[in-house]
Amino acid sequence: MAVCIAVIAKENYPLFIRSVPTQNELKFHYTVHTSLDVVEEKISAVGKSLGDQRELYLGLLYPTEDYKVYGYVTNSKVKFVIVVDSSNTSLRDNEIRSMFRKLHNSFTDVMCNPFYNPGDPIQSKAFNGIVSGMMVQTG
Amino acid sequence: MAQCVQSVQEFIQDSFVPMVAVLSSDEAERVSRKNNLSFSELLRPFCKLTSEGHIRDPNNQLQTVKNLRVCVNNLVTSLQTPSASVSPAQYRLLSEVVLSFQPQEGAQTSAVKTGDYSLNLSVTTPWFEAYRDNFLQSMPASDHEFLNHYLACLLVVSSTETVPVEQFLKLSQEQHRIQHSGEYTNPKWFIPNTLKYYVLLHDMSEGDEQRAELVYEDMKQRYGSHGCYLLKINSRTVSPEQDEQIPDPWSQYLLRNSQRNQEMFDLVPAANVAETSAGATEVDSSDSAETGPGLSSSLEVHPLQLDTSSASLQTLTDVHVDLKTGARDSEHPALGSGSYGACLTLNDHDHVRQFVQEFAFRGLLPHVEKNIRQLNDQLLSRKGLSRSLFTATKKWFGGGKVPEKNEPKTTSNLLYPPEAPELQIRKMADLCFLVQHYDLAYSCYHTAKKDFLLDQAMLYAAGALEMAAVSAFLQSGAPRPYPSHYMDTAIQTYRDVCRNMVLAERCALLSSEILKSQGKYSEAAALLIKMTSEDSDLRSALLLEQAAHCFINMRNPMVRKFAFHMILAGHRFSKARQTRHALRCYCQAMQVYQDRGWSLAEDHINFTIGRHSFTHGQSEDAVMAFRQILINDSRQTATQQAAFLREYLYVYKSVNGEKKGCLPELPLPYIQSSTTRVFFGHERRLAEGEKQAATHVSLDQEYDQNLSAMWCQLEEQLVSSANRGIVPNNFQPSQSCLNSQTDNLHPPLAVVEEPIIVELSFRNPLKVSLTLSNLSLLWKFTADGTSSPGKTQTGEQITGETITNEEASATQMALKDDIITAEIIKEFHMGSEETKMARLRLLPHRTGQLNIVGVVYDLTSSFAGETASNTEGQQALSQMTVRGRQDLKIRGPRLNLTKEDKMQVRYGADQRLEPIITPPMPLMEVFFLQFPTALLCGEIKKAHVEFCNVSAVALCGLRVASTHPDFFTFGSQATTPVTPPSSVSAENCSAYKTFATTLQQGSVASEMLVSAEEFSQPSGVMNIPVHGGMLQPGESIQLPLWLRGPDKEGVHEINFLFYYESIEKGPKISHRVLRHTVFICASRSLNVQASAFHSTAPPPHSVDDKGSRGTLVFIDVENVNMSEGGVREFHIVQVSSSSHHWRLHKYITPTKDNDCKLSSRERAKLCFRATRCKPRQANLDNVDKLIFADLSLGNERIISSSTPCGDFFFRCCNTSTLQQVDVNSRTSGNSRSLYSAPPSGSGTNLTSVTRKCNDLDLNIIVIWKAYVIEDNKQLILEGQLHVALHSFGKEASSLVPKEESQEMVLLKFKSELPPPVVLPFPEVSQLIKTSLHYPETFTHHFVQDSLCLVPVTLTLSNCSVALVDVIIDLRHNSTSSESLEVHGSFSWVGQTQYKLQLGQQEVVSLTLRACFFRAGVYNLNTPRVLARPTEQNSVCETSQQTASPALIIIINSARLQKSNSSDEQLSL
């Protein structure tokens, strides 16, 4: 399913990044980091026209040769990025959307944890589990 | 995109210029060679025309041609067909061009600030422009376009030629042959009848000018005045002497090449070496293998064999060969940079310029104009008729040269014949384009495009599209928007259909440039990125870099995309062996990634930067970059980290190899400098046999704020007692272990020849293990003025100057070891991510100021896994060792006192590591012998303590202070009897001194008067009774020590602080201390509860003593020992009393023979009589004397007033009073009124008054023996318990009541309820003692007399020593209805209220009368007695305590009779 899932803080540093093939981790880091430009572009574009009523899901940020990068921004400007293999054609926009929603819910749970210090890297087992589930589901 | 020097228009215009070939005779070439230039090179700087030219278009409109440039090249013929990709030679050339343009150090940079990023970028990218220009110039001529086909040919002949005209003819034929014979595919020619321009080159220095003029005249006639020219050059004779400075316009066109070569030669081997040594992972090894042959081939290639028309390449190779062979052109002595145009004067320059202008305006432009007109006519004539016909026939017959349309792929390679009409249009378009007639060019291109597309001639179509787009852009006034889709189609066609990357690249370069000029950066970037491919790393790198610049130049700069593409570019650069550029790219990208949490990327960039920096010999940067990787809390895997570390160490080692001397600072492992601890003195010696050494301080102990405060307090006590009660101003608690929490503001004092141990905490942040070896401290030492005697000769040398072991040279080591010996830890291994302490020792041998600067060590990265499998050579590599140092900088605590401190972040000083070495001081060790660990509460035990002076200096003033002064005693000298103790006590090892009670005193106590001062120790400090008051060096002394188990059960931590001084006066260290901590486990023994009561009966034998009333003392003794197995039974051996005024007189129970035994959980009550002593001698001496009275229950008496019993008694008294004060101060918050005196003076008076009558300062000492069975042996333990009775009636206990633990109190958020109001002065209610005297039964005949009057005597006795006003109110009846019901009512008759004043201890009797109305039982105790001391007006009367009910029985005698009679009646 997803090959890389990342949560990025408001200040654009990673809170959580996980990718499936570990040897390619660096590449995914670069990809996710670069996608932030597109995210910002999209936010600023939407922000002008609709004000507060913007949709959290940003859709496809950009396609690369091998991957598709999807973005999602919470109201507190925390970004979620999901990288999907281009060859995986079975994934529809709706499914990506629901993945993000699930991720967001889980992230909210992490934030609600009184022992979590906002801004720290996420180390929650539950969150990790959700992410693992998304990455494994269809391989 | 970085800014360019040229504008876009200029750039495009210069990219497409008319091409002019040069064909020169050998002689002419020789003439120009004098200037070290070929003829074409000679012209090159002047090819750009400054003046405007004019041209008429087919409609006879005048068009201006501005800034025309012509490109002059030597005619080089070849057979090669134009390839679709860059040839290797060309590629090499391009890469050299890029290599030669390195970013300057002080290059202009611009600061870009977007969001929270602020970046420093280089504004220009000259290497890219150079690349672009070179690339465009070196475009191979292709068939589908004519732009870089030769439009004209210069035929150059020297005037020195014998027959120049003939030579011209020869050249002309040669040109014709080249163009028309079909032997050569290259060069290509624009138009069949190429313009030939005849140039006569005249050398002013050697030729005959007249002759040249003549020849020129001849030429004019032959070729027309517009077709020939006489160029005079070389006016200057070659002579190095008269070397006036003439501007050298060639160097910027040519010189670069040779310099570049030189540089390349230097660089390539270095790069090779570095690459192989570093074991490059990223650069393919095949790449490096390729360079070798590639390089050599470039040297071997003959200049004439070079394929393309690029003259610059030729010259380059020329220079190459020149460099290799030495001096081919030996005729030119001044060969080298700056020697171009040596024979040319400024006049000659003007000549050349004029020539070029003449050629362009008179020759070239009219030629072009003519051709345009011609082509236009041709096309027009064809347009009406043949064009439609042509297409019609094509449609109808579908053939001819035009291939089938169903194979569009193959058509890309379709070739039109040179005369095809489609090509004519294109040709005309190109001509128009070259002379800047863009309107016409556009329409022609547009037409051509349509035709080509119709024919599916894709290559041609793409070319037309490209140029149509460009000319549309260049049209002045821009009548139509730039058709970027034309470009896109063109690029796509070139790339995908034609597979011609070179053309595609040209197209992309142009298009991106145009897009950028229009601000369409993202499109430009997309275009550039699309052009990156695997076939050319260099191109990809450059284009990616430009794309990155596009991203940053967007209106909303995309910083991250910029960074990412920079990294991609850097990667490509490094693959293209342009490592400097790669480094620059990575460095720029680093600005974005740095310190933003993208550690993986950051590490990668750092690593690459490190690598590249190292290969460029910028080792410092390399070290910095690698350091960054290691210092960051890296998320890399262990193997990755190991690789980083190894790389780092390798680089480091090579850096160190370069510079000798001071050791480099190492980043690993981290030193947590704030946790550094410094310990002064020897490490603690462990117990020796039975001896138990004092615990003192060691590095193993954790620092505890409370503990250290406690020690400090003890030391203060000691110091004040040593200084007669005054603590000196400069008192500093001695600290032998310094850490972050101690006071480090003053430099610590260390003693010479005593070690200084520094504990450092190292942290290894890596996942690989580290090994430090040869770890030792670095120090600086400044000797003070007074060097120690005996070492004067060396002392002189070292006095005053600072010595350090920082630069370690072997010769000085001996001397340094003489001053301070630094211990070296051979190996210190650290596991992955481990924090480990290292203890490093210094031993100073001189006095002075020491400064511990840092640590020095060898850092080794050990790779266990690799060494096992690899060969020896690799093992050497994997065992990389670097010697380096780390400084210790300890920052003090943050200051937070003043406002400035609070506003800023300031730190205090920390002088932990700057000890002052002082002259020798005494050093004492203390050992304990037979020291118990567990005691019963109150148990007395004797142990021994040994004091040992281990230093070379005598010590004195031995003292000890303790947190539990009641725990131990050394015995007081005053009471220590000289006589040996009795045999009995010796047998039992009894701690007490006893003697058998030979005199049967019966139950009467023996008394002894002792002054309290003999025992009193002010403030818990004890002088240790050492014989002579001092300990000589090496001497040791053993003293007995008595211990008494604490009264509270549980584990007690007992701290001793021993104090001693040096015999010598005035050393820097005034005293030294030694700490000792013991833990004693106290278990319960006996609980003694005592209470005292006034006995109403006067003591029989003290009738004379009026003041003392007899007092009964009850002592409850309970065995509360829980361990039933251990202690079998307790015996009460003796009860003693100690008091100022009281004494135990005799015991009532038990009787003599019955001594009191208590086994577990048993309890006994003893009863004693106590009497008040006469206030005689005590007052006379004016000395506080205590009377000790011993009541022995056994047959031996223990002298309670002597050691140790007396000692402990006094100790306990001291501490208990202290404790009470403690309790008061603690509880004063909520129960102030209870304990503390009222504020008014009268109140204190009152309490004292009232207290006095109840006071009883009787202390009771219960001495017991316990029989314990341990290991089948019976042991007798002894002990004593103290109970202090302070007032009558109150029970006092030896066991301290357990305080309710405060910890478990629930948190209350509401404020607590105010404490219940306590009745003031409960003591006042006991001022007056009342008793009623009356007959117990009273018989009255109520029939006769209805009222029964009973006389009652009320005795009032004043207990206090003050006058007391008493009010007795009889009327006051208890109002409770209950009492009425039970007792019925009676009333007092007669005077019912009395007011009396009672004197001091006066007894008054009042006679009252009670009146009863019927028979019954009455409580007579109804009078209410109110009393108050007379002086106390303010205090209202207090009702005195009501005693137990006083019952009286009134019997009705009439009733008796009556009942008798009723009995009779019954019987009747």
Image (tube, coloured by chain):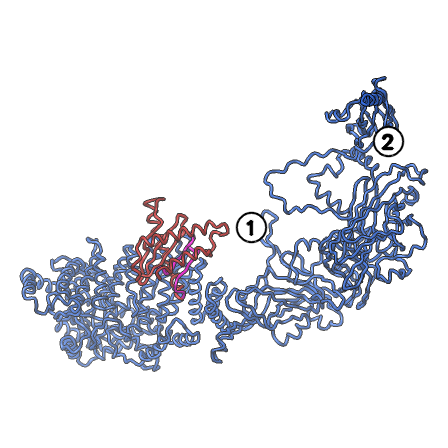
Chain colours: A red, B blue
As rendered, which of B1457 and B458 lies closer to the eye?
B1457
Q: Which residue is mark 2?
A: B1357
Mark 1 belongs to which subunit? B
Q: Secondary structure at mark 1?
A: loop
Q: Which picture quadrant has residue B493?
A: bottom left
Image quadrant in which the N terminus of chain B is located: bottom left
**Magenta part of the chain:** A1-22
**Where residue A78 sits in the image (x, y, percent)?**
41, 51
Query: Residue placed at 58% from the left, 53% from the top?
Result: B906
Q: Which residue is mark 1?
A: B904
Q: In the drawing, does residue A8 fall left or right of residue B1389?
A: left
- Do the residues under discs 2 and 1 have CB atoms within 8 angstroms? no
As rendered, which of B150 and B980 lies closer to the eye?
B980
Image height of B1021 relative to B1410, above or below: below
Q: Secondary structure at mark 2?
A: strand
Q: In the drawing, does residue B1132 fall left or right of residue B85?
A: right
Q: Which picture quadrant has residue B460?
A: bottom left
Q: In the drawing, does residue B474 fall left or right of residue A103?
A: left
Query: Residue placed at 87% from the left, 60% from the top?
Result: B985
Instruction: Tell me, yes or no, whether dots 2 and 1 are on the same chain.
Output: yes
**Where residue B1227 sits in the image (x, y, percent)?**
70, 42
In the rendered image, residue A19 lying in the magenta stretch gets the answer yes
Can I make out residue B620 in this image? no
**Where residue B1337 sits in the image (x, y, percent)?**
85, 27
Tell me if mark 1 has few (under 14), some (14-19) or many (20+) residues whose alpha carbon lies within 10 angstroms of its own.
few
